[in-house]
Structures are given as structure tokens and as C-alpha cells.
Amino acid sequence: MSRQSVARAHQKIQELSWEPMYHTPVSHYGTDYTFRKAQKKDPLKQVLRSYFPMQEEKDHRVYGASDGAIRGNMFRQVQERWLEWQKLFLSIIPLPEISAARAMPLLFRNVPNPELHNGQAIQMIDEVRHSTIQQNLKRLYMNNYIDPAGFNSSLRNFQNDYCGTIGRQFAEGFITGDAITAASIYLTIVAETAFTNTLFVAMPAEAAANGDYLLPTVFHSVQSDESRHISNGYATLLMALADEGNHQLLERDLRYAWWNNHRVVDAAIGTFIEYGTKDRRKDRESYAEMWRRWIYDDYYRSYLVPLEKYGLVIPHDLIEEAWNQIWNKGYVHEVAQFFATGWLANYWRIDPMTDKDFEWFEHKYPGWYDRYGKWWENYNRLSTPNGHHPIVAEDVDYQYPHRCWTCMVPCLVREDMVMAEVDGQWRTYCHETCRWTDAEAFRPVYQGRNTPNMGRLIGAREWETLYHGWNWADVVQDMGFVRDDGTTMVAQPHLHLDDPKKMWTLEHLRRMPHLQSPNVLLNEMTDEERAAFHASYVRGGPAGRFARPE
Amino acid sequence: MTTAPERSVPKPVFTDAEAGAKQFPDSTARKFNYFVPQKRKQTHYEDVTVEVQPDPRHYLAQGWLYGFADGQGGYPLDWTVLKAWGSDRPEPQRGPGSGGRGYEWPAHGWHEFRDPNEEWELSLYRYNANVVRQVNANVEAAKRAKAFDQWNPNWIRFVAQHVGAWMHVDHGLGLYLFANANRRGPTNMHNTAIAVNSMHLIRAAQDLALYQLTLDEEIESFFGAAHLETWNSDPTWQGVRDLAERLTAIDDWAEAVFAANVVFQPLVGELFRSQLVMQAAPRNGDFVTPTIVGAEEFDFSERDLRYTLALFDLLTNDREFAEHNLRIMNGWLAEWVGRTIPAARALQPLWSQPDAKPIRFEDALDRVKSRFAGIVEDLSLDLPKELER
């Protein structure tokens, strides 16, 4: 169709919408936002007559590339270090995608603009596309990569391993609570507009550098749909801004959504890009450099700041703080160290860092070796069984961290840890903003204003609680992270597959001290003990070091 | 002599990381191992669909993390009154030392549902792209053949008003019943099938709208906005409109899908599409409209009804709650048939509008009732007395 006919076609399909005369459609999802009817236009003017063939053509390219990769033996050139982290990433990502599809109906009854509903319905089916095309990529990896373990169990393992809950927020945050908070601000305004750049553009580039051109093929195809979704979010945001009564809620939600996305996405993608790559060219961009370009410049300065003139209160302080966390406080490095500390509670293999990696990190993040080098040398030393425990139970000057109750990434930047008694339980938070999210934002009253539709943080949010007092071998068995000989673990802290003596088994774990839940222990302390513990914890770090005696 | 600086690019490395390069535990375990396939072998559809939407009753060890204001998270099973075996078992309680194990997979019968159409992205785009290509080709061929010149004034008016009115039904149900319900089913298989159903209807609505746009360009006396007045105020359509609105007001997602696909579509949708438009059009010189309406008919009869029957058949044969489900569904049947038959009967004046008449209304209604009775029988439900109104 020509552009003119697309515009006419789009105009015609606007005649399809109608206002109910006899019955009110069911309204399942509430919001504390208020909207006035407004003729906001769907800027993409997508009609299904052209949409379906377009997507089919994109599919042809993706599946053609998949066939080509197999015929061309791509896996002879894929870095195992990289593909092992895909076991985590491709466990996580189909759920946020399908959750975004499920989120669209939250907007139908709350955003009174039928033209936008068309865009939301197309986003719904886009997201079905993304979820299943990504599952299909994982299936292809399982079938063709040397080690299928972890791919073959991913949708069980993701739901019970010690990092899975962190990633799951990036899905559940879209589908529950206040409809606008979830499906508009958290999903489209922040997650899609800001963070899909690092997820679907920066990360695939790193995949290609590690011999995997299928991840870029699939994810760039996915990203080409995202512009539609970003437009959906922008149109809804402008409608919300038109009512001054929404400004307080927008400020709240932008602060929560920004900070939570930073905590979750930067933790995962930062780790994949920095610690999953073998590409150590000095001139390749670090995650911090990518973040500065994609998120700080493209999202914050080009997208968010111009909205200030419409009355949107931008969380400048939190954006600067996120950068501070990444650049000065080593956030990504602290997370990677935590993932590697608990390698035995995962379902992928984590390759030790080498001298070449050290050199690159020092070049990109001056001072890295002094902070993290010694610990990674210990990780390498302890990576094959030789009469010692996995690193988590060895004396390597690493204080096992408390989890953040809100974002569930542990309180790794020790100086920022906040402790509070909330809902009758002592909880730890990685940052004051996470305390605020739990104790103030996700509540039925916010700053004296009734917010009856705001969601709740629920669930058993500390993974370690479930296994308090358990033997580690039983923990791993309970989660099902065991290979088909019944004893060799799926996870390994190295990449050696062909030497059985180097593979960790359940038997190696039996001798370890029992797992202890930091939160259970915290709640067993007296007030004085807890205060002393907190004072010591915040003096600890970096790299998880115990506080030095004063 | 100057030399070009070496470009900084990643270098290919031979890693030999392909399947079969080494033997070790799990080296041949190349199947998703967290679900039991419906048949002997796992299908591609199952691999990309099953378990993407988690469930605290089996693997979701820490439970849902975000809830609505009432504390409910995820996809509560009580968003429908129907039950599958295991539905009443409590979610595993988590606390210090509880471990993370739930019930053995699937934990409850909802996870046994598989869409017989095996819809996922590859299938849905392939199918719908084919439909829109064929619809476009049909309309384009008709334009070139000057086929619309054969239409008589009454038929032109009929298509503008009444075929035009039908697209509002498709659009309303597609968006506000089916797209809405894609958030509410208990598994990914349910919600994906429902989302695809939604796109069939939205596409069908747009197919008709764009067809109208073409007719507006091709036929001088075609009034492209006539459908609006018909839908808004023509008494013939107000029963259908009332019913369509009522369908979008249903709270229970399963009742909504049931009422739409088991009752409304066979008794009103097929009555209008197959027994009126597709019968009357050829006699009035129109060979194009039936191909567009027929595409929608195929969506319903060959795909949407198919998954719907599989969904409800599993529940009427449930090993624990068959009786409960039969009682509920029989109640829904009586209730929705009681509302649908009057709406269908209100359409009767349409049968006398074309110059060349289709089959008699009563015969048409008998045909769809007979077809409906077959669907009801397939589901082991009772034919409601309301059918004879």
C-alpha cells in the first residue's frame, strides 16, 4: 500500500470503535490515575493488512538465518563463556515478553482512547511473537550447542534458582497492581523505552562478537517492533500528563520504575556483557559506556528531559545515582561476583576470569583489580574440586550478602544498605529508594493520598529463607539442577566438560556447612545485635569484603 | 609508504562448541524436561509455549512477587468458576526451611490443555498473512473485472449497512472480550490461543472495513459511513449489539470464551455469515463479499471453535470436576442461548432485503441450530430448552 492509502486505511478502521449503549464492559483492573477522553493519535497507523505480511517477512529472515547458522556450523565458533549466560537470559526473557502481551488489557478500560487500543492489541500479538521466537532460539541452542544442560531445564530452573526471582520482577511488574503504573509507566515508559536498548541492541552486538549471530538476528527483529510499543507508551503518558491530579502518581511511578529497572536490568545485562564475553579489545565499549550512550544520552536526555515542560517530574537524582552505582560503586561487578559466588545454586557454567580479562577490566574500570582481582583469582583456584568447598563456603573475605526485599538483588554496595521493620518483619534494602518502594510507594496511601489500586509486594522474597538449615546437596537436588547421571551438577565454575574429575557432584556438596538465611538470622537478633550488625555491614565492601576493625 | 591501520573487529575463534563434540553427563539430553507432552513426542508448539507462564503450584518456588491491591498475584485459578483437577489444592506454603518443591508437574489439570491449532508466532503470522494476501487478491481481481458493476442498488445498500454493521461485532469482541481475556487464563497455552482468537476477529473487522473503503471508491452510490447508523440505531441490529455488549461485560474469562464461541458465534455469527451473506451474495451478482466473510468463517469454524472445544472438552471430562463443570456450563448454555435466540430472530428482516432472496430465515436458523446441537453434543452438554424460543 502507498503511504496515502495506509493513512486512509488507518482512518477507515477508526470507524470500527463504538461506545457501549446497553452494558458496560467488564473492568477488571483499577487505577488511581484519571483520564479525560482525548483524540491522541496512534502515530504508527498500523493496519493488519500490512502488519501480518510484514511480520511474516521478518520471520522468513530470522528462520532463514537460523537454518544458515546450523548449516554453517556456527556453534564451532561460539564462545561457551557467552552461551552459558544465555541459559539464564533465555530463561528470563520469554516471561517478560508474554507478560507484556498480558498487560495490554490493563489499559483498555483505563485509557479512554480507542485509537490507542488498536495499537495496544498489535503490541499484544507482537509480544506473543517475541516470547515464542525467543523460546524457539533457546530450543535451537539446546539442540545444537555442546552442553544442553540448563537449556533443557530452563523453565523449571528459572522459577526456583537463586537469581530467578530477580529477573521475574521484569515481568510481574507489568501485569499487576495499578494498571497505569504497571502496563504504562513500568512497562512502556521505562522498561521498553529505556532498557530494551541495552537488552536487544547492546547485548546482541556482544553476542556477535562471541561468534553467535543468531541472538542478534532474533533480537534485532524483536527490537524493530519496540518502536510501536514506545509510541503506545508515549501517547498514554501525554494523556496522563494532561490531568494535574496525576502528576504526583507519575512522579512516584517514574521513581519506582526507573530504579527497579536499573537494579534488575543493569544487574543482569551488565553481567552478561562484561563477564560473558571473550572479546577483550580495548576499544570495544564497556557496559558503562553503552549505558551512558543508550540510557543516559538517548533515553534520559533525549526522551525524558523534554517531557519536563509538560509537568513530568523527572527523577534526575536517581538517574545520576544509577550512573554513580555503575561507574563509581561497581554495581555490575558486585552483581557478577555474587552470581559467581553462588554458582552452585545456578544452572549454567561460569567461566573464571583470566589475566586477559583482568587487563581489560583494569583498562575500562581503573582500580578494578584492587577491588575484584583477588577474589576472581580465588574463584579460579577453587574452580575444580580438590578437597575444598565451592567458593561460597571458603574463606575468601566475602561476606555473603543480605537480599534487598524490594528488588531482590542483594545489598551488594554495602555502604548503601538500609534496614527497616516493615509489616512486622526486619527487612534489608539495597538502597533507600528500594526501602521507599516497599514502605511508602506500594501502599494504599501515598503521601496522604488514597491509592487503593496500588499493587503489593508479595511472595517469599528471600530465596535463602526456603533453604534455611539445609545441606547444599539437598538444596541443589530439590531445585533439580543435576545432570542425567544423577550426581553431576548442571552448574560448574569452569568450562571443562571432558574431564569427569573436574566436574562437581552432589557428593562434593555434602560436606559443606548448612545454608543459612540472612533474613531469618536478622530477625532472630536482638535490637542491639541488629544495630551492631548493620553498623558493621555498611562498613564492608567493596567486593563483599568484611568490614575492617575500626 | 602508508599502511592502513588494522580495523578493530572481533576475530573468529574455533571453539568446537557444537553438539556432539564431547561426551559428558547430559550431553545428549536435548529435550525440554520440565513438562510431559500431550502425545508421545514433544511438539514444536509445546516447546515454545508450555510453562512460559509459571505456576506456584509446581515450580514457582518463591511464589508470585507482585500482587494487585487485594494481594492476589499472577493468574488466579478462581478467575473462572470452572475447575480442573487439582484446582482446590492449596498453593504450597513457603517459609524458613520449607524447600522449593511444589506438586509434581502439572499439579493441576489446567496445564493439560493444548491448542489443537498449535498456534505460536510462526503459525499465526503465516496463517494471517496468507488470509490478508488472499483477501487483497480477491478484491483486486474484482476491481479489475469490474465485478461491482453487477451489483444492484439493494445489494449495494445491504453490504454498506449490514455487512458493515457486522464488523463492529468483530472489533468489539476481538478487543474487549478476547484480548481482555488473554490476561486471565491459567496457563500460557490458554492465553496464547485466546490472543490469537482476538487477532482473528480484529483482522476480520479490518478486512471488512478496508473492503468498505474499496467499495466506497469503486461504487458511486456506495455510502461508506452507512454502517454507523445501522449499528447505532437500526432496530434489526440492536439485539445483536445488546448481546455483543453483554458478552464484553462478562467477568469470568471462561464464561466469556464459552458464551462467544460455543453460543454466539454458531447461533448468530454463522447465521449471519454462512446462512445469509454467503448465500445471498452470489444470487445478487456478488462473488467477492463471500470470500471476505468466508475467511472469517474459516477462522472461526476451523480454528477458534477447534481450540474452544478442546479447552472445554477437557473440563467436561475432568477426572475430579467433570460434574461441577457440566453443571456450570449447562447453566451458561441456558442463560446465553436464552439471550442469543432473540437476538438472532431480530435479524430476520435482513433476509427479505436483497432482491434475490437467500434461503428462508427459519431454514437458516434451523441449520445453525442443528450445527449448534452438534457442538453441544460434542461437549457432552444438554441442549437447552431456550433453543426452541
Image (cartoon, coloured by chain):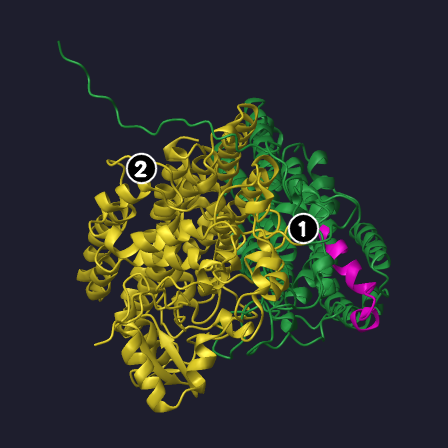
Chain colours: A yellow, B green
Q: Is residue A184 left or right of residue A514?
A: left
The residue wearing badge 1 is B33
Per the model, the C-alpha gap separating discs 2 and 1 is 36 Å
Q: Nearer the viewer, residue A60 or A353?
A: A353
| Residue A280, disc | 2
Image quarter for residue A402?
bottom left
Q: Nearer the viewer, residue A353 or B44?
A: A353
In the depicted structure, whether residue B162 falls above or below residue A207: below
Q: Where in the figure is residue A291, as x and y percent of width and height?
A: 27, 49
Q: Which residues are magenta?
A: B307-325
Count residues near mark 1 (Cα–Cα under 10 Å), then give few for <14, some for 14-19, many for 20+: some
| Residue B339, disc | none
Quarter of the image that includes the N terminus of chain B? top left
In the depicted structure, whether residue B133 falls above or below residue B121: above
For residue A302: magenta? no
> Which amino acid type is marked by label 1?
Asn
- SS state under label 2: loop
Q: Main secondary structure of the magenta part?
A: helix
Image quarter for residue A419?
bottom left
Q: What residue do we see at 19% from left, 57% from top?
A: A305
Discs 2 and 1 share one subunit: no
Judging from the image, mark 1 belongs to the subunit labelled B
Q: Where in the figure is residue A109, as x and y percent of width and height?
A: 47, 66
Judging from the image, mark 2 belongs to the subunit labelled A
> Which amino acid type is marked by label 2?
Arg
- SS state under label 1: loop
For residue B313: magenta? yes
Q: Is residue A502 left or right of residue A288?
A: right
Q: What residue do we see at 57% from left, 37% from top?
A: A146
Quarter of the image that includes the C terminus of chain B? bottom right
